[in-house]
Image (cartoon, rainbow, N blue to C red):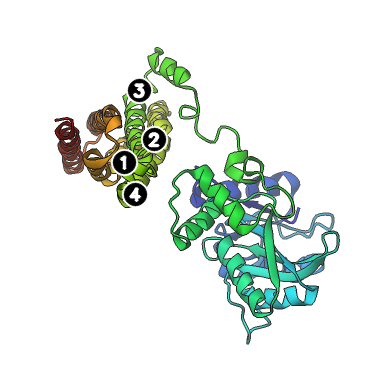
């Protein structure tokens, strides 16, 4: 095996992947007695951080390479294993394999590829796009040319930038770009980033994720050669249980799990759920106002107030599971052995981290409510579809109840912090956020009541 990368996709950090890569590398070396190198974010040596650096000399050169002190493997011995060679493991960002379709010759496609790729035509003629590898080739079965691209960091060079830059060069050569294709899976973030680009460029108003995905597929021409099926091609959609055990359950299942004789899920998860529903109701009222002829004059206002409410509703969903997970971490930490000084230190560290998480999760709910929901809901209450007044009232009360629930959970978990100054700072922050929520709820209800009269 040449390389085994670990890639953070969802619900895991780069740092956690580094731990996994180290664990895997150590086990591989121990069980198979082969040399293993760390690369990418897991490497601590700049001169062997990339795969090209480690691969330099290829298989044939690895025997002599291992004799050098600076090339001692991170795991395993420096003994040459002819049947294996060496393996690299580490952490990198998701690599997107991406082809741009053109009615052109192979040479014309490659000419554009040289303009785009980071290495360009050489050190004196670099290309325009960083973290981009590209060549031009001809797809005989389709009778078209393609620019074949590897985007090694789509945060630096997103898909839509590569596509639009290729179109610019093609236009100068009077060539037609007819679409593109993604090879394998693609992170949802890459597709949504492309959608946001075209939404901004074309002054569109789209908040639903499924519609954004549809727009990106259309604008990038991802279904030109074969249908791009989001549920099969977007990595998050292809993973089962992606939404979290609680958030992904049915309403009935969630209610039954709360009603069960277990301490979790409890008030924190319920508070996050109620808060998410409050924000969702606000977004719904906005949607039922926007685009209707009788409220056409409010379209610009709705374009401002709907997105924060919609985003808050979605961003609160993970807190439903996060609150229960934090509680479980706390109870697990309490059960850790404390027979030796080392075990007591491990237990103390785990307890401190768990306690901090039990506070941060409900505190984050309070923060999301105050930064994303109340201002928008107050504006909506003053002018939104009055036929939805009860939805506005229920939404406001749900947001307020969610704020109270989050506040109570912050407060009860603060009792586990011994440092009085830290405890007081957290409590003051929670008090301030709750007070804002109470005042904002009153403003929403007052605005609705004035319109009723």
- The residue under label 1 is 364
- Do labels 2 and 4 touch, CB within 8 Å? no
Task: Give the CA separation, mark 3 to mark 1.
Answer: 17 Å
Q: Which mark is first along the chain, 4 or 2? A: 4
Taking the view exactly as shown, the residue that stands out farthest to the top is 261
Of circles 3 and 4, the one toward us is 4
Closer to the camera, 227 or 79?
227
Q: Is residue 288 visible?
A: yes
Q: Position of residue 347 (x, y in %)?
A: 39, 34
Of circles 1 and 4, the one toward us is 4
Dot label at residue 299: 4
- Do labels 1 and 2 touch, CB within 8 Å? yes
Query: Label 3 crowding class (10 Å Cα cut-off): few <14, some 14-19, many 20+?
Result: some
> Which residue: 69% across, 77% down?
174
SS for dot 2: helix
SS for dot 4: helix
Dot label at residue 319: 2
Task: Give the CA separation, mark 1 to mark 2.
Answer: 8 Å
Q: Position of residue 260 (x, y in %)?
A: 41, 13
Query: Label 1 crowding class (10 Å Cα cut-off): few <14, some 14-19, many 20+?
Result: some
Q: Which mark is first along the chain, 4 or 3? A: 3
Task: Give the CA separation, mark 3 to mark 2.
Answer: 12 Å
Q: Which mark is first along the chain, 2 or 1? A: 2
Dot label at residue 266: 3
Of circles 2 and 4, the one toward us is 4
Image height of 328 relative to 235, above or below? above
Q: Quadrant of residue 452?
A: top left
Q: Quadrant of residue 373?
A: top left
């Amino acid at each position: 095996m040449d390389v085994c990368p670990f890639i953070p996709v969802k619900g895991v950090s780069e740092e956690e992947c580094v731990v996994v890569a180290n664990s895997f590398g150590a086990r591989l070396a121990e069980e198979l007695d082969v040399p293993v190198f760390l690369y990418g974010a897991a490497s601590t040596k700049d001169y062997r951080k990339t795969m090209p650096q480690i691969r330099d000399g290829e298989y044939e050169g690895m025997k002599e390479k291992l004799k050098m002190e600076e090339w001692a493997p991170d795991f395993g011995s420096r003994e040459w294993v002819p049947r294996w060679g060496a393996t690299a493991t580490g952490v990198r960002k998701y690599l997107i394999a991406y082809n741009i379709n053109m009615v052109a010759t192979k040479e014309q496609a490659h000419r554009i590829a040289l303009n785009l790729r980071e290495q360009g035509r050489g050190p004196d003629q670099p290309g325009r796009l960083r973290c981009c590898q590209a060549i031009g080739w001809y797809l005989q079965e389709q009778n078209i040319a393609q620019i074949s691209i590897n985007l090694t960091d789509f945060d630096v060079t997103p898909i839509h930038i590569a596509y639009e830059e290729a179109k610019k060069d093609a236009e100068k050569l009077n060539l037609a770009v007819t679409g593109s294709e993604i090879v394998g899976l693609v992170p949802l973030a890459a597709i949504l980033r492309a959608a946001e680009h075209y939404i901004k460029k074309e002054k569109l108003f789209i908040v639903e994720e499924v519609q954004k995905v549809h727009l990106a597929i259309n604008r990038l021409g991802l279904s030109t050669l074969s249908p791009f099926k989001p549920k099969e091609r977007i990595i998050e959609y292809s993973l089962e249980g992606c939404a979290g055990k609680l958030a992904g359950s049915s309403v009935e299942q969630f209610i039954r799990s709360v009603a069960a004789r277990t301490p979790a899920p409890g008030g924190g998860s319920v508070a996050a759920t109620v808060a998410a529903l409050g924000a969702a109701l606000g977004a719904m009222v906005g949607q039922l106002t926007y685009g209707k002829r009788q409220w056409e004059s409010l379209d610009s206002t709705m374009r401002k107030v709907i997105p924060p409410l919609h985003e808050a509703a979605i961003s609160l969903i993970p807190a439903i599971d996060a609150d229960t997970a934090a509680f479980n971490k706390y109870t697990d930490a309490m059960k850790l052995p404390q027979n030796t000084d080392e075990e007591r230190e491990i237990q103390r560290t785990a307890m401190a981290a768990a306690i901090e998480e039990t506070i941060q999760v409900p505190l984050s709910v309070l923060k999301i409510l105050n930064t994303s929901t109340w201002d928008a809901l107050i504006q909506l209450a003053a002018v939104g579809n009055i036929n939805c007044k009860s939805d506005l009232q229920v939404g406001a009360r749900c947001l307020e109840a969610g704020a109270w629930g989050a506040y109570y959970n912050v407060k009860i978990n603060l009792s586990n912090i011994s440092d009085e100054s830290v405890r007081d700072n957290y409590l003051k922050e929670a008090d301030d956020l709750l007070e804002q929520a109470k005042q904002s709820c009153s403003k929403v209800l007052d605005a609705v009541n004035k319109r009723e009269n």
